[in-house]
Amino acid sequence: MFAYKNFLKKAISVGLDESSISFHSHIPEIYDKLTGVNGSFVQGLKGVDNYISLGLNFKINIVVNKINIKELESTIKFLSKRGVK
């Protein structure tokens, strides 16, 4: 839902001041495979971008598994380049 900026703004207006986002991979096919939802990478990334643009404190959770472990370092670099601290 945080891919929808107005939803995130509403959540902030009622008291959300920190949150966590699960982000499985910087590779869309891996991300979507792990969530089981086609297009979830795009939504997840939009949520990350919305958090950054609104200045909300957040943490990224990456559940490491045999599908995404080889890409872990690249995923961290990808998120860092987008502005994740």
Image (tube, rainbow, N blue to C red):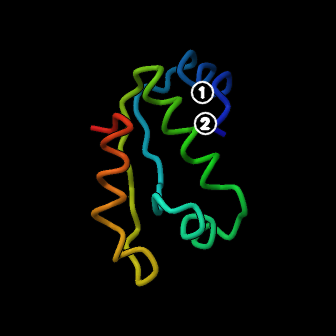
The answer to which image quadrant residue 39 occupies is bottom right
Q: Amino acid at mark 1?
A: Leu
Residue where numbered disc 1 is placed: 8
Could you say which is closer to the camera, residue 18 or residue 79? 79
Three-letter amino acid code at the position of disc 2:
Phe
Count of labels in the image: 2
Q: Nearer the viewer, residue 12 or 63?
A: 63
x%, y% of residue 59?
A: 35, 44
Q: Is residue 45 above or below residue 37?
A: above
Query: In which quarter of the view is residue 66 placed?
Result: bottom left
- The numbered mark at residue 42 is none
Judge left or right: residue 73 versus residue 54: left
Task: Check contact, mark 1 vs mark 2: CB within 8 A.
Answer: yes
Quarter where residue 10 is shown: top right
The answer to whether 83 appears left or right of 47 in the picture is left
Q: Does 11 sit above or below residue 71?
A: above
Gap between marks 1 and 2 measured at Cα: 5 Å
Q: Which quarter shows the C terminus? A: top left
The earlier-in-sequence mark between 1 and 2 is: 2
**Kind of element beneath mark 2:** loop
Q: Residue at x 29, y 52 (%)?
A: 77
Neighbours of disc 2 within 10 Å: few (<14), some (14-19), many (20+): some
Q: Residue at x 62, y 73 (%)?
A: 33
Q: Is residue 4 left or right of residue 55?
A: right
Q: Is residue 73 left or right of residue 17?
A: left
Residue 45: where, in percent of width, then height? Answer: 54, 44
CA neighbours of label 1 inside 10 A, class few (<14), some (14 to 19), many (20+):
some
Q: Position of residue 1 (x, y in %)?
A: 66, 40
Q: Position of residue 25 (x, y in %)?
A: 46, 62
Which residue has dot 2 on it? 2
Does 28 sit above or below residue 64? Answer: above
